[in-house]
Image (cartoon, rainbow, N blue to C red):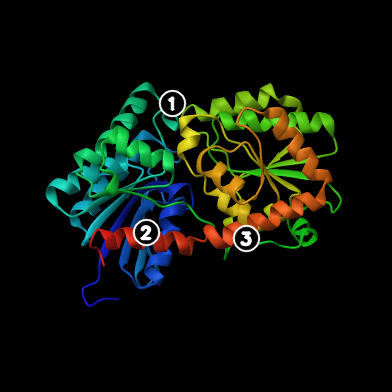
Amino acid sequence: MPNNPVNILYLNHNFEGEGTFLRCFNIAKIITEMNFCNIKLVTTSTSDRFRIRTKQINPNFSIVTLPQITQRPSYLGYLFRGGFNCIFALGCKYSALHSFAVAIPTTAVPTIISRYFRRKPILIDWDDAWSGGYATYVSTFANRLTTFFEYRTPRLAQAKAMTVCSEVLRRMAVEQIGMHPSKVFKVLNGANLDAVYPIDQSEARKVVGIAPKEKVVMAMGRTFTKSFEILLEVFSRVFEANPSVRFFVVGELCDYGKLGSYISGIKNRFFTVSRNIHFTGKVPYEEIKYYLSAADVLALPMEDSIHDWARFPIRLGDYLASGRPIVSNAVGELRRILIQNLAGMVVDPDDIEGFSEGILTLLENKKMGDMYGANAQQTAKEEMDWRTVARDMIEVYKHLGLG
């Protein structure tokens, strides 16, 4: 660590272990392990309702978890955590502030306040197009507020730079927000190769309770929009063609705002196949590798919308690292990565029949599946290791004179 170390404050609205938190955590952990700088990450606790806790991940990296306040995600909780974030933004010692997902007022407001009271360099990370995406599943007022902060915060905070996870967001940052192209840096999401890796399928199935000879199709994720409807329609067609196939959806499905009723409605619409899907609920991250390795085919549904074109679901890294064959109707960065590396069978975004046929083909053609799986694992190692992503972020900080 240099004599005058760089201290960077990360602000993130997510609950610990979910969504963009994983982007923050993996990048920060590796950057600090490399002794480039000190990072304090402020995020939301998954268990504490009223206590603020701090834990030291390594000598240069600490995480502060803010209380939930309410048992379920609520505007009241976001309001309180926004206040806490303002205190950290105004009171912490830092050389630069890096705010993640400023569409959320919890991070947007302290970022803007910091600009005028601390006058430290501000970076903004954009990894989801909230307007027209998740924001449509909340109240009209929240939708408008989210859209306002998503597009106005970079200018109001006079951001020195933006980091984005996709080419679509890079273009949007330039064309719609007005950032100069030289100030927008693409930093992809990565794969945690230390936590997810191929495991012998028979051993993995013993751990998760799947019979050795069963045909298993698996999807993983937390926040689905229209892609959930696509997934269940694909599963329905596969089930019609082969009723012996077992289906798993791994992860606790987000039911915040209007998403809960939307997901329930889709389940009811596809009732026949829904009752044959095992929804695991929340699974500890250390067990994810067993579920993925137990699958014969991994399904990765996306929708042909600006929301999905712009984002980069972190589960892609886990899928690739598991070395299992992937079938997807991917768009955006995911489509580019899968096609460019022959790391999965990719169909057109609206080709439900092709998606279903792709799964059925790989269930029967092990040789083809092994080829896709091997390419997937190689892609994870060579292109998507979080260590590579962290080095890209370090280059951004160096470009801005940090470190």
Q: Is residue 56 left or right of residue 364?
A: left
Which quadrant of the figure contains the N terminus?
Answer: bottom left
Judging depth in this view, the residue of 80 and 37 nearest the camera is: 37
Residue that badge 1 annotates: 136
Residue that badge 2 annotates: 393
Q: Secondary structure at mark 2?
A: helix
Residue 38 position by quadrant: bottom left
Judging depth in this view, the residue of 219 and 80 nearest the camera is: 219
- Which residue is painted at 38% across and 66% down in the image? 31
Q: Secondary structure at mark 3?
A: helix
Residue that badge 3 annotates: 378
Q: Nearer the viewer, mark 1 or mark 3?
A: 3
- Which residue is painted at 20% across and 39% down in the image? 156
Please tell me whether residue 119 is drawn above or below residue 102 in the rendered image.
Answer: below
Q: Is residue 103 visible?
A: no
Please tell me whether residue 3 is drawn above or below residue 187 in the rendered image.
Answer: below
Q: Secondary structure at mark 1?
A: helix
Judging depth in this view, the residue of 386 and 346 nearest the camera is: 346
Q: Earlier in the sequence, mark 2 or mark 3?
A: 3
Judging depth in this view, the residue of 266 and 311 nearest the camera is: 311
| Labels 2 and 3 touching (C-beta < 8 A) | no
Within 10 Å of disc 2 (Cα), the crowding (few <14, some 14-19, many 20+) is: many
User: How many labels, in total?
Assistant: 3
Q: Earlier in the sequence, mark 1 or mark 3?
A: 1
- In space, the residues marked 2 and 1 are separated at their CA atoms by 31 Å
- In space, the residues marked 2 and 3 are separated at their CA atoms by 22 Å
Within 10 Å of disc 3 (Cα), the crowding (few <14, some 14-19, many 20+) is: some
Residue type beneath disc 1: Thr
Please tell me whether residue 58 is drawn above or below residue 268 in the rendered image.
Answer: below
| Labels 2 and 1 touching (C-beta < 8 A) | no
Image coords of residue 186 (percent x, y):
39, 49
